[in-house]
Image: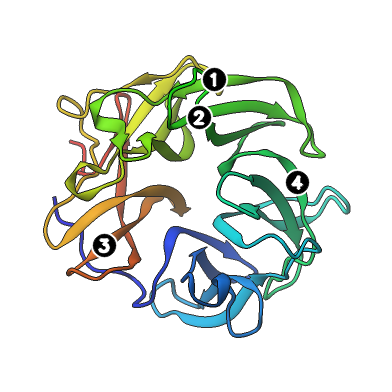
Amino acid sequence: MVHGTPYWDGELADPVKVHWKGQWLSSGTGTAENGGRQSDGRYFPLLISADNQHWELCGGLLEPLPNPELKHHWAPELRVVQSPETGGECLQMVFSAGATIDQMYTYVAHSTEDRPVFRSAKAICHGIDGHIFGDGARRYLYRCTKRTDGERGTAIMGNEITPEHDLIGAQVPILQAVGPEYMTPFGYVAEGMFVVKKFGKYWMFISRGYYEWQYDTVVMEADHPLGPFTILDPERGSFHLRSADPVRRPGHVSVYSEGQRDTLMYHAYYMGRKVRQAFEMPLYWGPDGPSLQPLR
């Protein structure tokens, strides 16, 4: 596996990209210094590029929320959606914030500015790594929560949501992390979900484990956005994102499209550095799912 090099030299975990108002934007979870705030006091670094290659750091995306106890801000997800207020296009950000790592909530915010700033946000529910997937007129929210069976670790939950981002019905268990490939000192861990619809199926990328070479990303498939999902065997399939020197612990992926091409984004540790940086590589599709190699 050839990972390449980071597309930006700074620290950037949980990376995302989106094309907005004639420019490319990228963000993610930034450095823990200064509580994660950028030079302008906002959270989540805002990178801007005219060509999707040369990037400039332009402050942050999120104004501090009214609750001063929110010390942790993680995993922003950006996508262009229809504005719930005007009906026109707007930029949506889903992210996690909380006073402690055990009190994290999933939030949603919107901006219409060319250089976006998110000035308020709505708390949806408890959980981290929130991901909203649109399927026609319907929307689904996925997030990681504590396991529901008493074991230590995480579970992936899903709900259909209303246009106002309220949950519909009871949460649906998508995955209870269990097994040696998920094991960490904190219990069984799965994280960083991202869903893509291709060939009439729903493909969910998940990262699992946490430490050293064990951390990897695999894919699950289902016939419905809320499952049931089946993990594709990474030893037999064509998709398995894993460590290969000098890149270690790649994961927490997202996917963006540029024309007919899809690109996989992820963070990893590079050349022995102690911080996570953002990488990307082409993503190919066939009826059997995604691949990191061109399909014949």
As drawn, is 77 to the left or to the right of 208?
right
| First in sequence: mark 1 vs mark 3 | 1
Q: Are marks 2 and 3 in contact (CB under 8 Å)?
A: no
Work out how far the residue at label 1 is from the one at label 4, CA to CA, in angstroms: 20 Å
| Position of 292 relative to 218 (above/below) | below
Coloring scheme used: rainbow
Q: CA distance from mark 4 to mark 2?
A: 18 Å
Confirm or deny contact between disc 1 and disc 3 (CB under 8 A): no
Q: Are marks 2 and 1 in contact (CB under 8 Å)?
A: yes
Q: What residue type is disc 2 on?
A: Ile
Extreme-right residue of the structure: 85
Relative to 116, say whether 108 is above or below. Answer: above
Residue type, numbered disc 4: Ala
CA gap between label 1 and label 3 equals 31 Å
Residue for badge 1: 173
Q: Quadrant of residue 229?
A: top left
* Category of crowding for the residue at label 2, using alpha-carbon neighbours closer than 10 angstroms: few (below 14), some (14–19), many (at least 20): many
Lower sequence index among marks 2 and 3: 2
Q: Position of residue 239 (x, y in %)?
A: 24, 36
The foreground one among 86 and 42 is: 42
| Residue 67 as seen in the image, left or right of residue 293 | right
Q: CA distance from mark 2 to mark 1?
A: 6 Å
Q: Secondary structure at mark 3?
A: strand
Cα distance between the residues tagged 3 and 4:
31 Å
Residue at mark 3: 269
Residue under numbered circle 4: 123
